[in-house]
Image (tube, coloured by chain):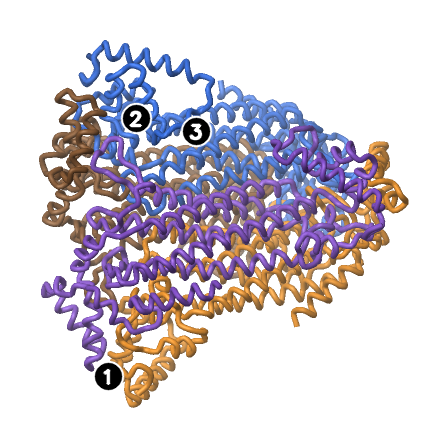
Chain colours: A purple, B orange, C blue, D brown
Amino acid sequence: MWGAGIITSDELAELNRGLDAIAAEFESAPCPDGDAEDLHTWLEALLTEKVGPAGKKIHTARSRNDQVATLLKMYVIAAGEELAGHLRRLIVVGCQRAQDWADQVFPLHTHTQFAAPGSVGFWVLRYATAFDHIRRHVDFCVSEWRRHCPLGAGAVAGSSIPIDRRLQAEGLGFERPSPNALESTSARDECVELLALAAQVALHLQSLATDVILFSQTPLGWTLYPAPFGTGSSMMPNKQNPDAMELLRGHGAAVLSAHGQALTLLKGLPSGYNRDLQCIKPLVRQAAETLFALCGLAEAFLTQLEFDRERITASLAEGGIGATLRMEQKVLEGLPLREAHHAVVEEVRAGGAATLAGDVESAARYQTTGSASPAETRRVAAELLRALG
Amino acid sequence: MWGAGIITSDELAELNRGLDAIAAEFESAPCPDGDAEDLHTWLEALLTEKVGPAGKKIHTARSRNDQVATLLKMYVIAAGEELAGHLRRLIVVGCQRAQDWADQVFPLHTHTQFAAPGSVGFWVLRYATAFDHIRRHVDFCVSEWRRHCPLGAGAVAGSSIPIDRRLQAEGLGFERPSPNALESTSARDECVELLALAAQVALHLQSLATDVILFSQTPLGWTLYPAPFGTGSSMMPNKQNPDAMELLRGHGAAVLSAHGQALTLLKGLPSGYNRDLQCIKPLVRQAAETLFALCGLAEAFLTQLEFDRERITASLAEGGIGATLRMEQKVLEGLPLREAHHAVVEEVRAGGAATLAGDVESAARYQTTGSASPAETRRVAAELLRALG
Amino acid sequence: MWGAGIITSDELAELNRGLDAIAAEFESAPCPDGDAEDLHTWLEALLTEKVGPAGKKIHTARSRNDQVATLLKMYVIAAGEELAGHLRRLIVVGCQRAQDWADQVFPLHTHTQFAAPGSVGFWVLRYATAFDHIRRHVDFCVSEWRRHCPLGAGAVAGSSIPIDRRLQAEGLGFERPSPNALESTSARDECVELLALAAQVALHLQSLATDVILFSQTPLGWTLYPAPFGTGSSMMPNKQNPDAMELLRGHGAAVLSAHGQALTLLKGLPSGYNRDLQCIKPLVRQAAETLFALCGLAEAFLTQLEFDRERITASLAEGGIGATLRMEQKVLEGLPLREAHHAVVEEVRAGGAATLAGDVESAARYQTTGSASPAETRRVAAELLRALG
Amino acid sequence: MWGAGIITSDELAELNRGLDAIAAEFESAPCPDGDAEDLHTWLEALLTEKVGPAGKKIHTARSRNDQVATLLKMYVIAAGEELAGHLRRLIVVGCQRAQDWADQVFPLHTHTQFAAPGSVGFWVLRYATAFDHIRRHVDFCVSEWRRHCPLGAGAVAGSSIPIDRRLQAEGLGFERPSPNALESTSARDECVELLALAAQVALHLQSLATDVILFSQTPLGWTLYPAPFGTGSSMMPNKQNPDAMELLRGHGAAVLSAHGQALTLLKGLPSGYNRDLQCIKPLVRQAAETLFALCGLAEAFLTQLEFDRERITASLAEGGIGATLRMEQKVLEGLPLREAHHAVVEEVRAGGAATLAGDVESAARYQTTGSASPAETRRVAAELLRALG
């Protein structure tokens, strides 16, 4: 006897034998058809066919309601772990490229206008720090999802058969059974949370894509856009288009929208299992798989991306991007900031923007923590990598 | 001299005097009008008017870009703390009512059909456990938001003036300066995260409302719906309508949508500050204030809600809700589950649903952790309250 | 020579022969693999293989940009027509059931409370009138989509080869060529409009599902829910669940969300074709196919749905639903409305709700156009059917 | 006696007198406070105070349910008309600027890359044609919204008092009474439709903004960005930022999201009036007012926008934008398209992109309807203006 005293040790041995046989039989078979309402019912029928009456006991103290909640939560936990892995790889590649490109100074934008000198490494480090922030959040959520196992919640109220939910929970990798059977079978918070995290990652991926498209523009041409990630034009012989980045941005929109779709699905449902809840499964799976593909694409792309030193150098003379540094020089010489600002504005108005170029040295003058100086970019990248372990 | 050596101690004293004067002057005044581009510019001009040249120094090593990012993050932190407070109060009232109503057995629903007996306390405990899960998440996010202070990120790249960002960060209640000035001025992750949490809370609040409306239906009438939360009809003299719950559900929809609106706003923006980012401020503020009002409404409502014992008792005879317990009784007597299920299905088909009533004793027969038994509801409620401290 | 003078009549004959051969070859073959960038490039290569040099001319004055815009618009037009067909069938079945059920009086709800007597036919007619409104809108949109053919817009600017876009447009079933090549290759308004219409249909379908679930509740049990559209419970032998209606509501949520997803996708894109636009194709197709399946489900379901006369009759005594009619009787006898209202409110407060039952005669007393009287329901249903032709 | 015979002509005169007095009294007064449940109840009480018993009759055969549905539909009709007016003005200014700028040739983009020569007039005409398409749609919807008046639908089922709904409908500017009282009080299709149209307009406005921001970029600087629509930087003396266009894009996101918010609000509600429906009113109003402000902003901006001829001319030498025209020249000389394409690709690869410049003459070579040639832009603009009347 084991646990609740429902299944004898002989029956347990038989059930295990039956399950092994089914596992072997269907290992590489396509998903079975049939009249069964779902996989759980199908499995029980097949098992009963193979091992006899013991099969009829396996649904004891169970409902499909808690079974689907449990399997879905296990899928979400696995997806969270896979997402964390993708984020780690993106942080690593981001930090490595930040170090590679720490001295490659180019114009940073604000308002889609050239603003101030900073390095390409500083730019890509932006995403590594963002992904590190989200990675910590993903790790937290995965550990929260593992706290409570839905199995044993039954249809809605638990069971009068004294099964040991703690054993079940631990066997499936959870910390403990969930504290309220109604909540366990009604809610899908782990799905909503995974989709919120997925949207946040997609938001940064599409921002990365938007930046690369901006940097690749005519006439900037800062990127040496890797050929496998682009295509030509069927009508315009002059074109090489940044298609992979446009697809990263475009497919990212689907991931951005999945969270809202889940909320719309769940809105207005009363407590207790409703069949509508089944519709969240393809939504979560599709969003997760799309996101993983996009993470892989971004990682591969960043690994192969290179920049055109010459084109970038030409751009450093545009936009008067040395103005802030000149203003701050005046401040360091004793002028109050507001007066220094007015002085440089006058200089720009008098046509001096061209003399306010950025250059490779200028970025080295930033002094603050987290600034665009090559040294600081290297320091932060190293620290991020170290914290990742 | 203090920090970066820009402002002398005399100037500091003057600036503090000026700021105190301005604070006193505008304490209860309406928001000032004027030609200034924003509050920061307005304040600097006024301060300079009051204390002279020192005012012209206060924007040193600063940009409105890092200032608005910092103030907004501080607002989000405060909103997160306020939300955590609301959730704590909702958990307390939920656990108290769970204990009050632990013995008030009524039919639980699945598929909006009567399903099995459980108590009203077990039902309300659903929400307390959900809010406890979200509260832990909110606490995590607030502590994450406090990790990195944007101030000192400047316009986009930091500053060449050697200010001490660590001092600023700690002075404002953050742990340390943010590691990448571009990320700090470009991203609004804390807003997106707050809105995701807000949506999750709103999802449960509207579910609570949906349940109460269901329980209040003709002919169920299980609730003694508190009069201040309802209204009559202008045409139908027979009606008392659960308006507050409908408004909880309706206004909740606005909170559900704010997260998606933020994503749409941020989508397609290149790195570096863009003026579009200002549009997230009213969105976050409106969603937060609506949510706080809804939390307050739900708390007040739950405190005053009562149930009609007689109407509920009448409902316990409907829907054959004792069927699962009878089936499990047969299992405990040795019948395999599947056979016991068939036996009770036959009984129901033969018209026996009426004899499968639930009653006050039946819920006491649940044995599993997290089940609908009165004892388990009391235990879980007590544990939740204890964990809250 | 034909049209622009590019292709000779011999070449035309050869091209037609080649296309016929390819059509025959791939009629029932799976979608071909290959290195080609897309279907258009693949077809040109294959055609050139089959008919020689003439194949190299077929892309003249064309770009994939206008080709995909044209094919997608043609798909949207076909989907609009299919949607109009579904709506017509839903209107027909709705009007037929409205006539079948015109005398089956039951309590109408407001605020999810019993409100006033009306017939089941009057209820289902609600949806027929809604679908008729949307059908007119769909017809308008389809005719608008046919106004302008994108083909010939080229990559972005048209072509310097004097092709006759009018001939092309008419040959493909459009009225005339589009007036601006940039708009034709940049925008996807027809997709956005189709998705808005789809969302509106889905909104009514999920409302229909919500109503049926409400009507099927314990203890109302007004529906004789058709067995093929429901399922049993794996744990609760007493349950029959309205699964098909829950899936109608649940899958409807995906259709509701597709419009917003399209807007998110398109937001932030600059003018001119961007590869992101390809991502709208699976979105539109999936939403359309899901919606058509849901329309078919709703039509089949309504055809088979029946109501339980006895259970409904029992409900007519609940909720004092005769109150408005009694009040209006007093008005017809000369009492001002407000005084009649107060009088009946007093009657209800004195416990007289039970005497204010609805009955089969009461609904016959409605006098206004569009009211819930059986005669008016029959009249409106007949008129809707007549207008449909 | 008038209509249903409820109100005598003396009472009618008194009521009109009372209403006139109230109108005068509150003409410029703030919105009144009070205990009344809503405006309709407040008005009835005040009227009764002023004119005595006749006031108690005015709610006869009415419910707040049909009153709010009617007023809201009237608001939506007025908003639709206002939107149509804005679109007309945008079409006019778009066509005028298309004519002004028909000869100002610049590089058109695809994939955010320079693609082919076309004129600024051709670009702005894109939006005029889009707005003309939407304007026709708005006109259709407004005429549909006028078809059916909700007033007289009562609470849910109509009335047993024989009022003449046709008279009411026509008096309020509708064609006829609505055919189903349940639909009239349950649905908000006109709101959903207005919000879909608003989203479509906002989509084009934010696209216009995105284009202008792109054109204003460093180092393109094609626009002479009108100063009242931009701002400087508090830290960077070199910056002038296109703030108004960023706000057009940013506030546009709120309008894009309102449609989805309405769907979320309406999802899951059962038939019959539910108080949730009140929450659609501020949503519709806010979206409409924001949109009108954005339309006004876009119109004013387009009126003042000018382009920098010199900077644009410099750009025409970039990106090999003459390639398609050269390829088509070869086609016109007899080469099959595919061979001409390969020949020009080789030319570009050999470094000849620089010789494939666009120029003012090149755009004149487009021959197709709707192309980017100055003549065609002028023709289409004139035709659009003519059609507008």
Q: Where is residue B261 in the image (x, y as percent from the top left)?
A: 43, 51
Query: Tag 3: residue type?
Result: Val
Q: Are marks 2 and 1 on the same chain?
A: no
Residue toward you, B278 or D333: D333
Q: What mark, if any, has residue B52 been given in the picture? A: 1
**Which residue is rendered at x = 13% and y = 43% of the image?**
D316
Decide: few, some or many residues near mark 2? Use Cα within 10 Å; few <14, some 14-19, many ≥20.
many
Judging by the rendered image, the residue that carries numbered circle 2 is C149
The quadrant in which residue A124 appears is: bottom left
* Residue with the most extreme bottom position: B10
The quadrant in which residue C9 appears is: top left
**Which residue is rendered at x = 69% and y = 45% of the image?**
A67
**Which residue is rendered at x = 21% and y = 42% of the image?**
D114
Say which chain tag 3 marks.
Answer: C
**In the rendered image of this protein, does residue B125 appear above or below residue C291?**
below
- Residue C279 shown left or right of residue D267 in the figure: left
Q: Where is residue B335 in the image (x, y as percent from the top left)?
A: 87, 40
**Sequence-first tag of 3 and 2:** 3
Mark 2 and mark 1: Cα distance apart in space: 67 Å
Which structural element holds mark 2?
Answer: strand
Decide: few, some or many residues near mark 3? Use Cα within 10 Å; few <14, some 14-19, many ≥20.
many
Residue toward you, D318 or A24: A24
- Residue C306 shown left or right of residue B351 in the figure: left
Residue toward you, D190 or C188: C188
* Residue with the most extreme right position: B333
- Residue C257 shown left or right of residue B320 in the figure: left
Which structural element holds mark 1?
Answer: helix
**In the rendered image of this protein, does residue B304 appear above or below residue C224?**
below
Q: Position of residue B308 (x, y in %)?
A: 77, 54
Judging by the rendered image, the residue that carries numbered circle 3 is C138
Q: Do the numbered discs 3 and 2 sit on residues whose CB atoms are within 8 Å?
A: no
Residue C194 makes an appearance in the image: yes
